[in-house]
Amino acid sequence: MENAVPTPIARPMPAPTGLGIEPGTWVSRLTWAILFALPTAVFITAAWLTPNPEGHGTHTQLGLPPCGFLVFTGYPCPGCGLTTAFSYMIRLDVLGAWHANPFGIALFLAVALFIPFAALGFVRGWSVVSALDRVHAEKVAIVLALLSVISWVTRIALISLA
């Protein structure tokens, strides 16, 4: 018995959940559910709102105040017109969205593509970080940020020249 090999302690196997959800992925699934629900709620809200023909101010229908930057400076902030652009885009009015905020079109399309991606992430139980890394989300975010700045600077320049 002196040369006996100790028996390893058996580790219990995790119990199946019965829902096809692997143990340890509930945090990812919850995150995916939130990442699906938030942009979906934005789209539902955009459909509910009536786009303001001025190209901005649609958000005031939600009880929010007018843009402080616009009120103070007379120039739109980078986000001015995004709610209006989304409200136009949900109605497939690309020209209306372009006049409200051209960047809103790119952002709307990115969000529209992200909703089914989040649903798939939820169903498959993907790691959120791994999945976003796989689709180069950081590069998409950089491109969107650059488009936002370019759009804003162009809008300011056009207003200044008018």
Image (cartoon, rainbow, N blue to C red):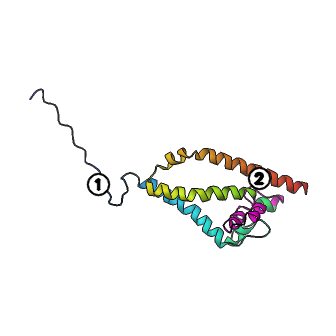
Drawn side of residue 142 relative to residue 156, left or right: left
Residue at the extreme top of the image, as rendered: 3
Where does the image place residue 4, in percent across and percent down from the top left? 13, 30
Q: Is residue 29 left or right of residue 79?
A: left
How many numbered marks, from 0 up? 2
> Where is residue 73 shown, x and y percent of the image?
83, 58
Secondary structure at badge 1 equals loop
Measuring 49% from the left and 50% from the top, which residue is drawn there? 128
Look at the image and tell me in which quarter the N terminus lies.
top left
**Residue flagged by tag 2: what amino acid is it?**
Ser
Relative to residue 28, is residue 2 depicted above or below?
above
Most foreground residue, 92 or 88: 92
Inspect the image, locate mark 1, and give the three-letter code of the amino acid beneath it.
Ala
Q: Which residue is mark 1?
A: 15
Stretch in magenta? 72-101
Asked whether residue 88 is drawn in magenta, I would say yes
User: Closer to the camera, 47 or 58?
Assistant: 47
Q: Quadrant of the C terminus?
A: bottom right
User: In the rendered image, which residue does mark 2 sit on?
Assistant: 151
Q: Looking at the image, which residue is at 72% across and 58% down? A: 79
- State left or right for residue 147 relative to residue 22: right
> Which numbered disc flags the more N-terminal residue, 1 or 2?
1
Occupied quadrant, residue 58: bottom right
Residue at image x 58%, y 66%? Answer: 41
Q: Secondary structure at mark 2?
A: helix
Q: Residue furthest right?
A: 162
Q: Nearer the viewer, residue 129 or 1?
A: 129
